[in-house]
């Protein structure tokens, strides 16, 4: 397999291909849509009074990757690759869950999207680390969005977060 020197090396080839097929390209930046999402989340309060955190790392992630519906091709490394939809509104009614995770991690957490098969909620914290929350628990996908997207597309098994 020869390297194509016309593309950036930001993502491994299969990840780059899956993201481009979903409509991503280097330099993609829809700040208007990101701000609409930010306002929608800021204005929402759960019945119990929980509110969403909105911070630069989340807004930047939404601006570059928001709206993408990513369907990886091929088998995964350790687990099946996840198809996912990067739209923070999937987490609109999860303010309490995200607040609980944020409290456990001692950092603000904001919604990022959803995994289509498991219905796991993708979330990002104020430092840019990415998580998925599903019925089996809370999982750490990576220290930044690039590594988290790579883990999802390549089927790299996430790390379970332990309480305490």
Image (cartoon, rainbow, N blue to C red):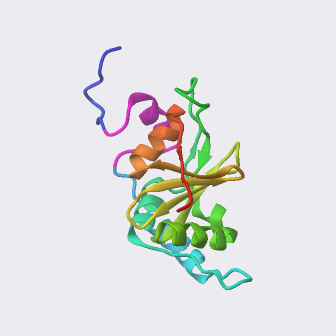
**Going by the image, does 58 lie left or right of 135?**
left
Can see residue 146?
A: yes
**Going by the image, does 133 lie left or right of 57?**
right
Can see residue 24?
A: no
Image position, residue 89 (x, y; %): 63, 65
Highlighted range, magenta = 10-26
Q: Residue furthest left?
A: 5
Q: Is residue 17 magenta?
A: yes
Image position, residue 106 (x, y; %): 46, 71
User: For this rendering, which residue is in front, 9 or 78?
Assistant: 78
Quadrant in which residue 40 is drawn: bottom right
Quadrant the N terminus occupies: top left
Please name the residue shown 40% across and 29% down the image: 13
Image position, residue 109 (x, y; %): 51, 68
Q: Residue furthest front?
A: 164
Q: Is residue 90 magenta?
A: no
Q: Is residue 83 above or below residue 77?
A: below
């Amino acid at each position: 397999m020869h390297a194509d020197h016309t593309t950036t090396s930001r993502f491994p080839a299969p990840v780059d291909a899956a993201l481009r097929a979903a409509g991503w390209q280097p330099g993609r930046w829809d700040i208007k849509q990101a701000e609409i999402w930010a306002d929608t989340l800021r204005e929402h309060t759960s019945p119990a009074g929980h509110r969403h955190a909105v911070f630069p790392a989340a807004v930047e992630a939404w601006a570059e990757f928001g709206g993408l519906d990513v369907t990886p091709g091929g088998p995964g490394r350790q687990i099946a690759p996840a198809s996912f939809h990067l739209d923070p509104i999937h987490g609109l009614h999860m303010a309490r869950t995200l607040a609980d995770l944020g409290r456990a991690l001692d950092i603000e957490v904001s919604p990022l999207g959803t995994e289509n098969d498991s219905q796991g909620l993708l979330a990002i914290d104020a430092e840019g680390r990415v998580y998925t929350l599903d019925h089996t628990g809370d999982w750490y996908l990576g220290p930044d969005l690039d590594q988290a997207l790579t883990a999802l597309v390549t089927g790299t098994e996430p790390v379970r977060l332990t309480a305490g």
